[in-house]
Image (cartoon, helix red, strand yellow):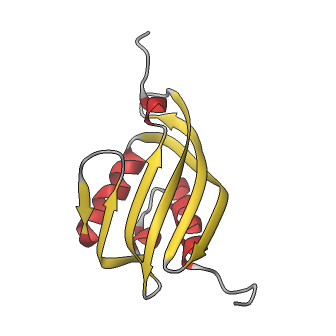
Amino acid sequence: MTNDQQTTTQAFMAALQAAESSGDVSGLLALHAPDVTLRNLTQQTWEGEAGARAFWETYLGNFEEIRSEFTHSHEAGGLGVMEWTASGRLRGGHPVEYRGVSLIELAGGKVSAFRTYYDSAAFVVAPA
């Protein structure tokens, strides 16, 4: 691979950051396969194009602002791994910063599965 060719994982990271700054998930969704599955720390699984849109719009809806900074990433054998720190403000203005790891399974240059694991305690806001 030449330096000017971007991996799907690199494209995913850039598209996520673009969605976070603009609120528009269309570029991110374009990287997902039609039968994609998405999971976070809940027991729910989101499936397909409508599920992917709901997943990412719900994610962005949790925040007044959010920015993911990727500290490590690697793609090999149909798997992309991303380690990151996200910081911003929750809806209501409470500052938030948390770390996590996301995995993407790749097929045909598209994300066929997305899984993310993160410090959910960062979302607990103590009563005033």
Q: In the visual, does 72 lie left or right of 53? A: right
Image location (x, y in percent) of residue 44:
24, 51
Between 95 and 120, the residue placed more toward the observer is 120
Q: Where is residue 22 in the image (x, y as percent from the top left)?
A: 51, 57
Q: Which residue is drawn at 55% across and 64% down?
A: 81
Placement of 24 over or under 7, stated as above or below: above
Q: In this view, does 72 lie above or below 58?
A: below
The answer to whether residue 84 is above or below residue 124 is below
**35 and 29: which one is in front?**
35
Would residue 53 appear left or right of 25 to someone viewing this image?
Answer: left
Tell me which residue sits at (62%, 69%) in the image.
Answer: 74
Which residue extends farthest top? 128
Rendering coords of residue 95 (x, y %)? 55, 29
The furthest residue to the right: 3
Q: In which quarter of the image is the C terminus?
A: top left
Which residue is the extreme one toward the front? Answer: 77
Q: Quadrant of the N terminus?
A: bottom right
Pinpoint residue 6: horizontal percent, then vertical percent. Answer: 64, 81
Query: Residue 22 vs residue 107: left or right?
Result: right
- Residue at screen point 42% across, 64% down: 25
Instruction: Give the number of callouts.
Output: 0
